[in-house]
Image: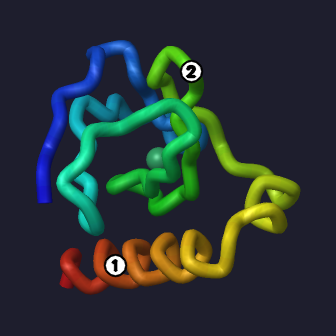
Amino acid sequence: MRSTRLSEDVKCPSCGEIIDGATCPFHDATPNPGDLSVCIYCLHWLRFNNDLTLRSMDQDDINKLKPIEFQQLKELTKYLLESRK
Ligand SMILES: [Zn+2]
């Protein structure tokens, strides 16, 4: 796992919380445009834009996910939910 500091302007488009860091749970990677993410606050599914801000994933985005990507987002959401207990 590796955490990266994001620009302070990055906000979750769903809940408006400032997301100042990203952690990749599956690879030792930094975020790239098009990468998937989950808001740590509201668990909304997100995608990085070209400028590494975040946008909401809509139903169309979700429909286009590869099965492995969908599975990873589901696992990550479950993990974040369980880590709150
Ligand atoms: Zn959020």
SS under mark 1: helix
Q: Is residue 37 left or right of residue 8?
A: right
Left or right: where 66 falls relative to 72: right
| Relative to 10, 54 lies left or right | right
Point out the frontmost of discs 2 and 1.
2
User: Which residue is the site of mark 1?
Assistant: 81
Label 2, label 1: how many angstroms apart (C-alpha)? 28 Å
Looking at the image, residue 73 sits to the left or right of residue 79; the answer is right
Image point (61%, 75%), residue name: 70
Name the amino acid, label 1.
Answer: Leu
Chain-order first, disc 2 or disc 1 = 2
Q: Nearer the viewer, residue 19 or 30?
A: 30
Q: Where is 21 relative to 68, above or below?
A: above
Q: Position of residue 55 (x, y in %)?
A: 62, 35
Residue 52 is situated, as x and y percent measured from the top left of the image, at 45, 24
The quarter of the picture where residue 42 lies is bottom left
**Residue where numbered disc 2 is placed:** 50
Tag 2: residue type?
A: Asn
